Image: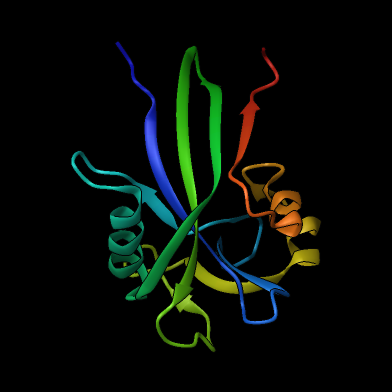
């Protein structure tokens, strides 16, 4: 029996909240938030800290849970179910340059404005609006493929 994949991702904003740190390919075809799969016995906070250190040598402080995204989609003939826990995070040191992924040289971590995020696909869909609203409560964002 297939089970949902559990992920943790970081929402990191600059000091004046005008830009967000996002992951993309060097062409900037789309944007997503840094993070990865939560390993067995690991908390979402621990996963975020581990993933950002492993991938970008970036130390962060993980703060409160911001968004829970549940994504059900079809690949080929099979259904997939993924749940992602997004936390507000802050870098330990200022980030003034593009950071390159340690394993995938065409993947970078870079600052983008909210307008830039709106101009290209940003995953999960709908997250930019939720970040702009930045309410204090946890938001559940459910996304499904069009086949439902």
79 on left or right of 147: left
Residue 48 position in % (x across, y down) = 36, 58
Visual colour scheme: rainbow
* Residue for point 63% across, 54% down: 136
Residue 35 position in % (x across, y down) = 41, 55
Q: Is residue 59 above or below residue 45?
A: below
* Residue for point 34% across, 55% down: 45
Q: Is residue 74 above or below residue 94?
A: above
Quadrant in which the N terminus is drawn: top left
Residue 34 position in % (x across, y down) = 47, 59
Q: Is residue 135 above or below residue 106?
A: above
* Residue for point 27% across, 61% down: 50
Residue 102 position in % (x across, y down) = 33, 70
Q: Residue furthest front?
A: 136
* Residue for point 48% across, 57% down: 64
Quadrant in which the C terminus is drawn: top right
Q: Nearer the viewer, residue 26 or 16?
A: 16
Q: Residue furthest left?
A: 41
User: Residue 52 occupies which quadrant of the picture?
Assistant: bottom left
What is the total number of numbered labels drawn onto the structure image?
Answer: 0
């Amino acid at each position: 029996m297939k089970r949902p994949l559990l992920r943790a991702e970081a929402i990191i904003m600059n000091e004046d909240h005008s830009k967000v740190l996002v992951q993309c390919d060097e062409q900037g075809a789309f944007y997503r938030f840094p993070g990865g799969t939560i390993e067995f016995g690991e908390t979402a906070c621990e996963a975020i800290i581990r993933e950002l250190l492993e991938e970008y040598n970036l130390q962060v402080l993980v703060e409160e849970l911001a968004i829970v995204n549940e994504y059900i989609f079809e690949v080929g003939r099979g259904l997939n179910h993924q749940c992602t826990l997004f936390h507000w995070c802050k870098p330990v040191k200022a980030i003034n340059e593009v950071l390159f992924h340690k394993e995938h040289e065409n993947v970078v971590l870079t600052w983008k404005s909210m307008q830039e995020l709106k101009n290209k696909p940003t995953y999960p869909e709908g997250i930019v609006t939720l970040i702009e609203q930045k309410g204090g409560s946890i938001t559940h964002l459910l996304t499904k493929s069009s086949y439902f």
